[in-house]
Image (cartoon, helix red, strand yellow):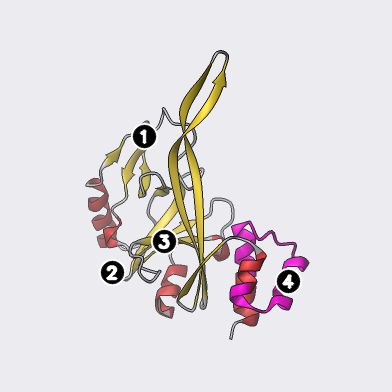
């Protein structure tokens, strides 16, 4: 992804012109409504985010970034959903190259997340990018599975379905992807600079199992250590 595209991602809060807004409105009017109560018999949630997040879709082909809708990712269906006037719709993503998710509490670039199309070699479609830097990208894959759990009651055992959440992480360095766990040893193995990274983690009391702290370490690497 070239520097121009990265810049446009960062400027994703710009509102689109009326022509594009009209085009988007027409596309969303054709979006399929989803039954919001289809998971009432399954405990837990199939969604990536606890609440729907404000999202800006971006089209490189159209050269536009603009405000869109409240979005979530359904890890059970493997699909994006938007909430509009209390109803759920499938997001028509075929015209977008990326989706920028804005945090609900922090309004900073480091806190933003992205869904970027065709970023990983050999993996078409969107991937969830937690950190997007010049050399490094931290990618999270999320899946939700409906699995049976056993609930013991007096006299019998009941099997009830429950959503189980699974997270898988990839660190891409200079276009080379590495499957990782969120732990210090994995990042040092890929990035090197053991002394500097260990000292930074200790000084800033980073918990490497937390994506937010991992993003701080990756930003430090990009700014101070990357060649």
Picture coordinates of residue 43, whole percent (x, y):
48, 31
Contact (Cβ within 8 Å) of mark 4 with mark 1: no
**Residue 100 relative to residue 223: left or right:** left
Using the image, tell me which numbered label, if any, was put on residue 198: 4
Residue tagged 1 = 36
Q: Decide: marks 2, 3 in contact (CB < 8 A)?
A: no
Q: Write the residue at 54% across / 50% down.
A: 104
Tell me: 7 left or right of 227. Answer: left
Residue behind mark 2: 62
Residue at (44% x, 44% y) in the render: 144
Q: Earlier in the sequence, mark 4 or mark 2?
A: 2
Residue 113 screen position, x and y as percent: 49, 60
Q: Characterize the local packing of mark 2: few (<14), some (14-19) or many (20 or more) Cα atoms within 10 angstroms.
A: few
Magenta: main secondary structure: helix
Please, what secondary structure does the residue beneath circle 1 have? Answer: loop
Q: Is residue 161 left or right of residue 218?
A: left
Residue 131 on the magenta segment: no
Tell me if residue 51 comes above or below residue 108 in the rendering: above
Q: Badge 4 local density, few (<14 within 10 Å), some, or many (20+)?
A: some
Left or right, 162 with reference to 98: right
């Amino acid at each position: 992804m070239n520097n121009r595209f990265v810049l446009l991602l960062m400027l994703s809060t710009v509102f689109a012109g009326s022509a594009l807004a009209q085009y988007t409105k027409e596309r969303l009017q054709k979006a399929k409504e989803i039954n919001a109560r289809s998971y009432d018999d399954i405990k837990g949630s199939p969604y990536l985010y606890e609440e729907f997040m404000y999202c800006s879709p971006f089209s490189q082909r159209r050269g536009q970034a603009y405000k869109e809708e409240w979005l979530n990712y359904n890890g059970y269906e493997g699909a994006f959903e938007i909430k509009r006037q209390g109803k759920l719709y499938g997001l028509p993503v075929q015209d977008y190259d990326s989706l920028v998710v804005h945090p609900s509490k922090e309004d900073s670039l480091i806190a933003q997340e992205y869904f970027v199309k065709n970023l990983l070699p050999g993996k078409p479609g969107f991937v969830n990018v937690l950190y997007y830097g010049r050399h490094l990208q931290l990618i999270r894959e999320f899946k939700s599975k409906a699995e049976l759990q056993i609930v013991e009651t007096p006299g019998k055992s009941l099997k009830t379905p429950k959503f189980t959440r699974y997270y898988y992480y990839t660190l891409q360095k200079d276009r080379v992807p590495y499957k990782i766990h969120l732990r210090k040893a994995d990042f040092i193995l890929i990035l090197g600079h053991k002394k500097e990274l260990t000292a930074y983690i200790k000084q800033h009391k980073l918990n490497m199992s937390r994506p937010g702290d991992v993003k701080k370490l990756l930003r430090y690497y990009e700014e101070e250590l990357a060649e």
